[in-house]
Image: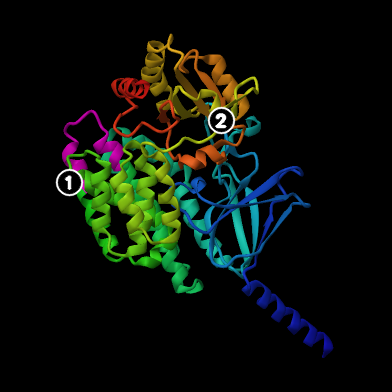
Amino acid sequence: MKILILYVLIQCWTVYLFGQGNAQLFVHAPVLAPDDTLVLYLQKERIAEPYRNHFRVLQKNNNNGVYSFSIDSLNNQHWVSMGLNFQKRGQTPFFTILDEFLLQPGDSVHIYLSPKKGSFRASEGGYDGDIPIVNESWDAKFSGRGASKYEALWKVKLLSEQDYNKKVMYTISSSYPTKLFDLHYKLQNEALDVLLNYKPTIESEIYDLFERQVRGQYGKNIGRQLEMSYYYRDNKGAVDSALRTEVRKYLDQGKVDLEHTDDNDILSPRYMDYLLKYLMTSFREQNNGEMDVSKCYYYIKNFIKPLKVRDRVIASFLLDWFQFSPNQEVLSDAMSLVKEPYSLEKVSKLKRLLKGEIGYSFSLPDVDENYHVADEYKGKVVFIDFWFASCLACHIYMRDVVEPIKDLYRDNPNVVFITISIDTYDVFKGMLNKQDFLPKGGVHLYTENKGYKHPMIEYYQITAYPYPLLYGKDYRLVNGEFNIRTLEGLKEGIEAALK
């Protein structure tokens, strides 16, 4: 009897403990090497790309083939991603095991991993430790409290990752672009059917959230493909009519989805991604394919009715696009409009991109580990550009715009050109040795192996590269009225700053 009472007390205490914001994940992977480390990334909120947001990082070493994660202080659900510590591209992790799975207080899930044949992902610069990424490399089974959620999302993940689907997509998209959209819609419907099988085993609120995630994933993918196939296409011709039909279909579906959206949907980051892509597609369609950042902002502002959803989509839009057209009026309007706390936090940081704002007081090393600080360049006009090795747009911009302008001012000691790489030291050094696009005679620095997590990157909320900035002699931003992404605009900006 005493043993029974003790057992009941232990069970009650366990339920109480996990109800207070704790969870556990046990990853069984005997195939991994003894020195392999698993890394867990936890996010409560996400706007724009995952790595641009706050996250907790937990690492566990191999303990006889088991990795035990105990997660505390979970006051709500979190999105969890998982990968091996060496599976990165530069400083950006690849989530080859879990990618935005749901973790809730009280979960105690066992994940049993077994290897399967996967496909390699090529990279110009290689990966940490020169080990390539292997996609679709795991089978998994789940047990324990909360396991149904993981099994459902895993089946959806497998569907979207099937190698033959990718090969079919890439093959048919080159010759028959509209067939690609049929395949995306087909995969979305199959994923929703897979999810439906788990509806009896998942809370209704969680099921609705997962459905939003699936619609968001494919909705964003379809919208992105429409952009590449239609708005950014040079060979306008016979396929225009078919593609226009696809745009109309996408916009009709997006309108229905938005009409059934409420503020609870901000819990689905992928659905927010989709709504932004839909609204931008709708805006472009009404403006002959052109993008005007200010006009698009007001379009989004006036289109979305649920206030929290509006705030999230506006924040995501501005994070991605404000850098191309910093506008005091737009930012002031957004800061007075947005009330959702996390969205306001993101938007408020964009003030640093406005004309007249003081620059970040950096201290960064060059290839010889000599540090350069912002104060060295007082009284000079300072051009700064952020880049990374595999960014083709970065190469083109520096080769076709920055290098000619740098050559124009080669004899002017009052104009300084600085490039800042977010790559690791080895990649950075290798690119310097090539010297095929970096402006000769410039100051070339890197972010101390901190990549996109360097405080300077976070200060400017950089989400896209290249990312040029131009500062006057007082180290205040002069971008504003000048399009420094062009030869003429950069020259005009420098001339104005020299006066």
Coordinates of residue 300 in the picture (x, y in percent): 27, 53
What secondary structure is found at the residue carrying circle 1?
A: helix
Residue at image coords 59%, 31%: 363
Residue 239 in magenta? yes
Which mark, by number, is residue 286?
Answer: 1
Label 1 neighbour load within 10 Å: few <14, some 14-19, many 20+? few
* Residue range of the region highlighted in magenta in the rendering: 226-247
Three-letter amino acid code of the residue under disc 1: Gln
| Picture coordinates of residue 399, whole percent (x, y) | 40, 18
Report x, y in % for residue 225.
32, 41
Mark 2 crowdedness (10 Å alpha carbons): few <14, some 14-19, many ≥20: many
* Image position of 223 (left or right of 53): left
Decide whether the magenta segment is chiefly helix, strand or loop: helix
Q: Is residue 14 left or right of residue 387?
A: right
Q: CA distance from mark 1 to mark 2?
A: 39 Å
**Rendered image: mark on residue 98:** none
As drawn, the residue found furthest toward the right would be: 2
| Element marked by disc 2 | loop
